[in-house]
Image (cartoon, rainbow, N blue to C red):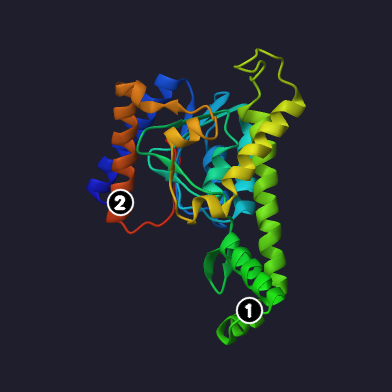
């Protein structure tokens, strides 16, 4: 290991140690697409920590990925920790948004964003957004019923694989189901009374509210783009989601930024594409 790398490793560990003391929580950073392999890195990182607290805070930065990978990661995390907090200093898109919704708390600032829950499927070695394919198929199918298909559109429709389309539909339904389950189980676990009327919150109330959020986040026509960022203000006002603003604590916010930027710059300098970091795992 180069001396500079050793110095950066030491500094990153110091940052994490300070953050853990401030939050009384174990800390982990995940900067990666949610693809096969990252789930194994997460498991290794957790199992290397032999002095676990009850809480884990995850600093997450991801463009999204495969929702089945997110599910496996959540199952691993919840096996070891009772409370999970997500900090999103930059972005957690698509399957990353579904992943974040498994947390007891979500922390962002004005710059952070989540995204529409448009799951991605591996196709010819690339990740492609499922909802875009489904929307295109539905649009062409409607035009075919009306007899308005052009020759080019007919050729495009004939190339769509029905097996793949079914796989896309299943990925969409899985994303929605997981988001609904995780929101009602974890994010809403301490929600006991409605803010407007003060009425008791039942399990059915939580599940209904979670479904409403899932339906909005999976509405591709509303967001128009797979990569559309949904900021903290929109999540709070339109989706009525409780998001903790990191910016309200300038000291903590500064320490998170210092750590996150140092780790991300280290990854860029060393051409590292995917990374899980804890004090015990580097």
Q: Nearer the viewer, residue 145 or 6?
A: 145
Q: Are marks 2 and 1 in contact (CB under 8 Å)?
A: no
Q: Residue 148 bears which disc, if any?
A: 1
Taking the spot 75% from the left edge, 26% from the top edge, the residue there is 203
Secondary structure of residue under mark 2:
loop
**Residue beneath label 2, please?**
1
Would you identify the image quadrant in which residue 77 lies?
top right
**Image location of residue 94, percent across then percent down:** 53, 51
Q: Residue at x 66, y 57 (%)?
A: 171
Precedes in sequence: disc 2 or disc 1: 2
- Label 2, label 1: how many angstroms apart (C-alpha)? 64 Å
Image quadrant for the C terminus?
top left
Choose top left, top right, bottom left or bottom right for residue 44. Answer: top right
Rendered position, 212 above or below 26: below
Q: In the rendered view, would you say 76 is above or below 240? A: below
Nearer-the-camera pick, 141 or 146? 146
Judging from the image, what secondary structure is the residue with disc 1 in?
loop
2 or 1: mark nearer the eye = 1
Q: Residue furthest top?
A: 198
Q: Nearer the viewer, residue 242 or 42?
A: 242
Q: From the viewer's perspective, is residue 268 above or below residue 43?
A: below
Residue in the image at 43% along x and 42% along y: 113
**Residue 265 visible, this angle:** yes
- Residue 11 placement, left or right of 21: left
């Amino acid at each position: 290991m180069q001396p500079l790398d050793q110095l950066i490793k030491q500094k990153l560990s110091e940052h994490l140690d300070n953050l853990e003391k401030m939050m009384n929580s174990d800390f982990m950073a995940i900067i990666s697409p949610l693809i096969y392999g990252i789930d194994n890195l997460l498991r290794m990182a957790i199992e290397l920590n032999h002095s676990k607290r009850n809480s884990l805070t995850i600093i997450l930065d991801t463009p999204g990925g495969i929702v089945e990978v997110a599910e496996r990661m959540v199952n691993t995390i919840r096996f070891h920790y009772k409370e999970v907090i997500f900090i999103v200093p930059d972005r957690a898109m698509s399957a990353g948004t579904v992943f974040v919704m498994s947390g007891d708390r979500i922390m962002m600032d004005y710059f952070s964003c989540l995204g529409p829950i448009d799951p991605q499927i591996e196709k010819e070695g690339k990740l492609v957004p499922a909802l875009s394919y489904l929307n295109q198929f539905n649009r062409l199918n409607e035009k075919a019923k009306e007899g308005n298909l052009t020759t080019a559109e007919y050729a495009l429709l004939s190339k769509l694989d029905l097996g793949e389309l079914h796989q896309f539909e299943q990925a969409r339904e899985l994303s929605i189901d997981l988001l609904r389950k995780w929101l009602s189980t974890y994010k809403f676990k301490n929600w006991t009374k409605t803010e407007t009327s003060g009425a008791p919150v039942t399990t059915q109330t939580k599940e209904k509210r979670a479904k409403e959020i899932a339906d909005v986040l999976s509405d591709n026509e509303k967001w128009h783009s797979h990569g559309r960022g949904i900021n903290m203000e929109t999540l709070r006002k339109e989706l009525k989601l409780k998001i903790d603003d990191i910016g309200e604590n300038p000291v903590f916010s500064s320490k998170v930024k210092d750590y996150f930027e140092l780790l991300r710059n280290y990854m860029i300098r060393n051409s590292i594409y995917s990374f899980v970091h804890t004090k015990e795992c580097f």
